[in-house]
Amino acid sequence: MLTYRKIEVRDTRQCPRCGAVAGRCSHLRAQHAILEIPERQNDRDIILQWSKGEEATLERLWLEGRTSYQIAELLNRSRSSIMGKIGAMGLTGLQGQRAA
C-alpha cells in the first residue's frame, strides 16, 4: 500500500518588470502548491504509473525552468523517469519551452 507525503512547491518565477521573486512585488502573484507525492518504502519500490496531478506538476515545473534533477527530488522519482515522461509529453525542448 502506498503512503503519501505532502510537499510545498514554492513559486520561483522572476517578475519581468522589477526582477523580484514572485510574491515579493505587486506585479506578479506567487503560486504555491501543496502536493501529495507517493512515498517509497525502500529504494527498490518502483512507482510506474503517473497520476494526472503528477503530470500537471511535471509540466508546470518544467515550463518554469526547473531542472530534471530538481523535479525528480520533488516528485520522489528517478531522473530517468522524469526525462522519459518529459519526452512522452512532448516537452523535450529547453526548460521553459515546448518542443517544436
Image (cartoon, grey):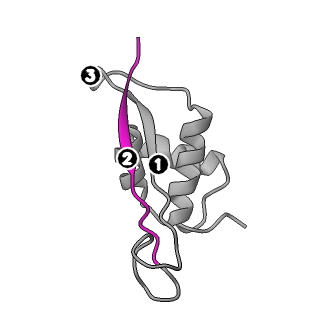
Residue type, label 3: Asn
Name, please, the residue furthest toward the front: 26
Which residue position is annotated with label 1? 33
Q: Residue at x 43, y 54 (%)?
A: 68
Q: Residue at x 53, y 48 (%)?
A: 58
Q: CA distance from mark 2 to mark 3?
A: 22 Å
Looking at the picture, tell me which residue is in the foreground, 18 or 67.
Answer: 18
Instruction: Indicate which disc residue 8 carries.
Output: 2
Marks 1/2 in contact by CB < 8 Å: the verdict is yes
| Circle 1 SS class | strand
- Residue 1: x and y, percent? 41, 11
Magenta stretch: give its range.
Answer: 1-14
Between circles 2 and 3, the one closer to the viewer is 2
| Circle 3 SS class | loop
Q: Residue at x 61, y 68 (%)?
A: 97
Between circles 1 and 3, the one closer to the viewer is 1
- Residue 49: x and y, percent? 55, 27
Q: Left of 6 or right of it: where is 100?
A: right
Which residue position is annotated with label 3? 42
Pointer 1 or 3: first along the chain:
1
Residue type, label 1: Ala
Marks 1/3 in contact by CB < 8 Å: the verdict is no
| Circle 2 SS class | strand
Q: Left of 90 or right of it: where is 24?
A: left
